[in-house]
């Protein structure tokens, strides 16, 4: 019996030593993400659940000044490319590609969304809300000392055990819930460059 009690005590102590706080998990996540840089390019999926409309999902690919965003709604495909100066927008229903001058702010907004995954502990009070065999679910509440009053009041971060890689980050904005997920690094020039040969027979409308 004494040996069994000793073994149980050892396991309890070992498990306790392995326990991590939300701050430690996020710090490790930041370290893993910092192994990559913007020159590699990155991709990310964003789901927007909008009241009375439903969920709209999009996948963004960003490499330097170039960007491509793919979205689908009600079975219709929409794709937008931008190189910082020119923008190409494809509408599958119209079978048309419209060319316009790019909106510079769109790139900075996409980068800002990605940076939401890092430095969370600087402006939020964090705690482990739930734990599964493969993930940590962390609740992030905006701290009173956070100087950015436009920052979301709360966010839900999911981190994978073993890799410490972010699985998803969810928050609520006006009339919608936004979830960013499937973040990855490594984007090619082809993925972010518009090529008319990929859309034979599509009408091109130049509005520059």
Image (cartoon, rainbow, N blue to C red):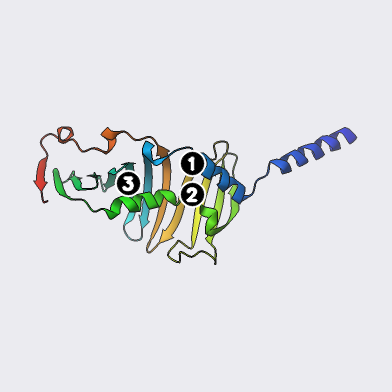
Residue that label 1 marks: 34
If you read the primary sequence from the N terminus, does the residue marked by circle 2 or circle 3 appear first?
Answer: 3
Residue 148 rendering spot, x and y as whole percentages: 46, 64
Give the distance between the C-alpha atoms of the residues marked 2 and 3, in whole angstroms. Answer: 21 Å
Classify residue 15 as left or right of residue 70.
Answer: right
Do the CB atoms of the residues marked 1 and 3 lie less than 8 Å apart?
A: no
Q: Is mark 2 on a helix, strand or loop?
A: loop
Give the distance between the C-alpha atoms of the residues marked 1 and 2, in whole angstroms. Answer: 9 Å
User: In front here: 92 or 167?
Assistant: 167
Q: Residue at x 34, y 35 (%)?
A: 187
Residue 177 rendering spot, x and y as whole percentages: 41, 57
User: In front here: 201 or 163?
Assistant: 163
In this picture, is 1 found above or below 207? Answer: above
Q: Comparing marks 1 and 2, which lies closer to the viewer? A: 1
Which corner quadrant holds the N terminus?
A: top right
The local crowd at label 3, few if under 14, some if 14 to 19, many if 20 or more residues have their Cα within 10 Å, is some
Q: Residue at x 41, y 38 (%)?
A: 184
The disc at residue 161 is: none
Residue that label 2 marks: 118
Q: Residue at x 21, y 51 (%)?
A: 102
Do the CB atoms of the residues marked 1 and 2 lie less than 8 Å apart?
A: yes
Residue that label 3 marks: 58
Do the CB atoms of the residues marked 2 and 3 lie less than 8 Å apart?
A: no
Q: Residue at x 69, y 41 (%)?
A: 18
Residue 20 rendering spot, x and y as whole percentages: 65, 46
Give the distance between the C-alpha atoms of the residues marked 1 and 3, in whole angstroms. Answer: 25 Å
User: In front here: 145 or 158?
Assistant: 145
Residue 150 falls in image quadrant: bottom left
Classify residue 98 as left or right of residue 191.
Answer: left
């Amino acid at each position: 019996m004494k040996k069994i009690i000793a073994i149980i005590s050892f396991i309890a102590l070992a498990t306790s030593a392995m326990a991590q706080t939300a701050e430690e998990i996020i710090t490790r996540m930041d370290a893993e993400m910092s192994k990559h840089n913007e020159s590699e390019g990155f991709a990310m999926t964003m789901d927007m659940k909008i009241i009375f409309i439903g969920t709209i999902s999009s996948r963004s690919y960003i490499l330097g000044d170039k960007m491509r965003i793919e979205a689908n709604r009600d079975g219709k495909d929409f794709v937008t490319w931008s190189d910082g100066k020119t923008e190409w927008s494809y509408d599958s229903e119209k079978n048309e590609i419209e060319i316009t001058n790019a909106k510079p702010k769109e790139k900075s907004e996409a980068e800002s969304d990605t940076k939401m995954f890092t430095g969370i502990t600087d402006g939020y009070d964090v705690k482990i809300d739930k734990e599964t065999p493969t993930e940590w679910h962390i609740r992030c509440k905006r701290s009173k000392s956070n100087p950015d009053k436009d920052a979301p009041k709360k966010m839900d971060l999911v981190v994978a055990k073993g890799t410490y890689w972010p699985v998803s980050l969810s928050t609520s904005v006006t009339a919608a819930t936004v979830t960013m997920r499937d973040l990855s690094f490594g984007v090619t020039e082809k993925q972010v460059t518009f090529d008319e040969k990929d859309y034979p027979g599509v009408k091109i409308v130049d509005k520059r």
